[in-house]
Amino acid sequence: MEIREFTEEDWAQVWPIVREVVRAADTYTYDPDLTEDAARASWIEASPGRTVVAVEDGRVLGTAKMGPNRGGPGSHVATASFMVDKEVRGKGIGGALCANALQWAREQGFAGMQFNAVAESNVAGVRIYERLGFEIVGTVPGAFEHPTLGRIGLHVMYCDFG
């Protein structure tokens, strides 16, 4: 598997992954009715951020976007998001994408990486993030309306590069 920069030709394979994850409404706070144009506008990061794909034999298995978490006085902290094709989850792709994002953020001189909204039900994601150095720094109770679990917490997670 190779992780490389997103190209325009990748969108045809990235969109079905994004669409499935967003419509499931069980991990991300995106509107489940997100249109393709809106998804593209929010997923494809402009500089200084970047969007990447995990590819094997020409097939996009997953994607990530990364960049500053906030502007101005908060721009020294990075953030990232990851989506993996449901057919290949559990095979290390999400972890590889996260490790790639962390490496990029360190190389860019960020002080750390923050995830603003990790659904507490996303146990596999939390486990990956903690293994890679993140810690839960707080949880907003009931901030995520999960389709089957009801209102659950959203974790704020942070990895300090210091």
Image (cartoon, rainbow, N blue to C red):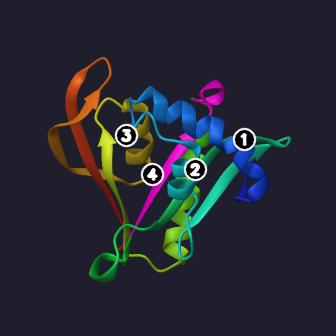
The numbered mark at residue 36 is none
Residue in the image at 31% along x and 58% along y:
158
Image side of residue 3 versus residue 83, left or right: right
The numbered mark at residue 13 is 1
Question: Which of the 4 image quarters holds residue 88?
Answer: top right
Q: Magenta stretch: give its range.
A: 78-89
Numbered disc in front, either 3 or 4: 3
The numbered mark at residue 132 is 4
Q: Earlier in the sequence, mark 3 or mark 4?
A: 3
Up-down relation of residue 67 to residue 18 (above or below): below
Determine if residue 123 is in view.
yes
Quarter that holds the N terminus: top right
Q: CA distance from mark 1 to mark 3?
A: 26 Å
Numbered disc in front, either 2 or 3: 2
Query: Which residue is tagged 2?
Result: 37
Q: CA distance from mark 2 to mark 3?
A: 29 Å
The answer to whether the residues at label 2 and label 3 have Cβ atoms under 8 Å apart is: no
Mark 2 Cα shell of 10 Å, populated few (<14), some (14-19), many (≥20): few
Label 2 SS: helix
Q: From this viewpoint, which residue is outermost toward the right?
A: 57
The numbered mark at residue 126 is 3
